[in-house]
Amino acid sequence: MTLDLNDILKVRKLPYEEERYLNMTIKVLKEQVKVFTSRLEPHDTGHLHTTISTLTHRITELQNEKETGRKTGEEGMEKT
């Protein structure tokens, strides 16, 4: 039996569970930003700057998702 990620995501339906999931994800991403920030050096760490920027952007997306209740990428999408 194969387990599809979409099946797992369908299980998490209740609003408080979704909010808890978002809060936990944001917390983990913020911790990772701290880890990568602590590894920055004056030279040869451009990949870390890119990673920090990407994670920070994702944190912002998730915070906006939490505030608006709309998932990232749903803007402009019509519900059927």
Image: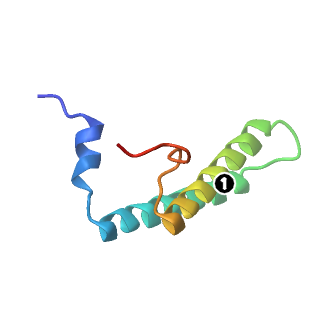
29 versus 44 height, above or below: below
Q: Nearer the viewer, residue 30 or 77?
A: 77
* Near-viewer residue (39 or 61): 61
Q: Quadrant of residue 22?
A: bottom left
Q: Is residue 73 above or below residue 29?
A: above
Q: How many marks can you see?
A: 1
Image location (x, y in percent) of residue 37: 72, 55
Label 1 element class: helix
Give percent across and percent down for residue 66.
Answer: 49, 65
Give the quadrant of the N terminus: top left
Q: Is residue 9 left or right of residue 52?
A: left
Instruction: Give the percent coordinates (x, y) of residue 14.
Output: 26, 65
Image location of residue 34, percent across then percent down = 65, 60
Type of amino acid under label 1: Thr
The residue lying at 39 percent from left, 67 percent from top is: 19
Is 4 located above or below residue 24 in the figure?
above
